[in-house]
Image: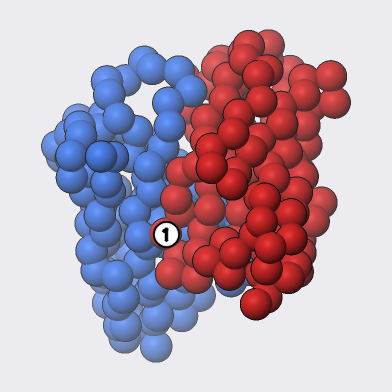
Amino acid sequence: GAVVSQHPSWVICKSGTSVKIECRSLDFQATTMFWYRQFPKQSLMLMATSNEGSKATYEQGVEKDKFLINHASLTLSTLTVTSAHPEDSSFYICSAEPGLAGGVGETQYFGPGTRLLVL
Amino acid sequence: AQKVTQVQTEISVVEKEDVTLDCVYETRDTTYYLFWYKQPPSGELVFLIRRNSFDEQNEISGRYSWNFQKSTSSFNFTITASQVVDSAVYFCALSEAWNAGNMLTFGGGTRLMVKP
């Protein structure tokens, strides 16, 4: 149980285009999902917290107009990198937290990640 | 502010050796949760364990064991009789109860290389 999928796993795009990444919890509902970014040989950096039915909460320094997050259902959150540039190239990972909002210390289950390369 | 430190950036062992990955944390909260995740070369983070601050019992799961010591704010992870498949980056993480968003604070990770 507790499987999270991400699509696509790899994406190569031209500078200036937008890319959408999907994160799905396959066997559980998740009121809360998280989006992380990871550079090579570094730890995970939280970009934003995605809450079903409400606006995402972005971490300091993350441009909300650049990284659009939509959490339209209890099993799907999407991250759209708008007008992508080479510096946006990275490994993007989502995670989902089973259960309803309000749980404390819940385990986050991670998706397999999406490698984005912007040319 | 919360912080997780994994001082070992890389460890290299030979198969069948035991290896311990250290994790030290800082928090002002009395209720918190500690996690370990494994990130193999494929990139996906695999959940290994969750421990709350009120449960200091050590845990063993097969070749994996965890030692939680509140007195030293440490949550160390030991792999017994390591195998090549254990090669991965291991992350320790902290979640504080006051933080309703359940955000995880990750350590920098320890890259474990197990050689045959």
Residue located 52% across and 30% down the image: B50
Residue located 25% across and 32% down the image: A30
Q: In this rendering, does residue A61 appear at all?
A: no
Q: In this rendering, does residue A13 appear at all?
A: yes
**x, y percent for residue A84:** 36, 73
Quarter of the picture holding the N terminus of chain A: top left
Chain of the residue under the numbered disc 1 shown in the image: B
**x, y percent for residue A34:** 39, 42
Secondary structure beneath disc 1? loop
- The image quadrant that residue B14 belongs to is bottom right
Q: Residue furthest left?
A: A73
Q: Disc count in the image?
A: 1
Q: How is the image coloured?
A: by chain
Query: Which color is chain A depicted in?
Result: blue
**x, y percent for residue A86:** 46, 80
Quarter of the picture holding the C terminus of chain A: bottom left
Q: Residues within 10 Å of mark 1 (few under 14, many from 20)?
A: some
Q: Residue furthest right?
A: B72
**x, y percent for residue B86:** 57, 61
Above or below, B13 relative to B92: below
- B44 horizontally vs B63: left or right: left
User: What residue would you read off at disc 1?
Assistant: B44
Q: Among the chains, which one is red?
A: B
Residue located 25% across and 55% down the image: A5
- A88 horizontally vs A69: left or right: right
Above or below, A97 relative to B20: above
Residue located 77% across and 24% down the image: B69
Above or below, A95 relative to A41: above
- The image quadrant that residue A85 belongs to is bottom left
- B83 horizontally vs A100: left or right: right
Mark 1: amino acid? Glu
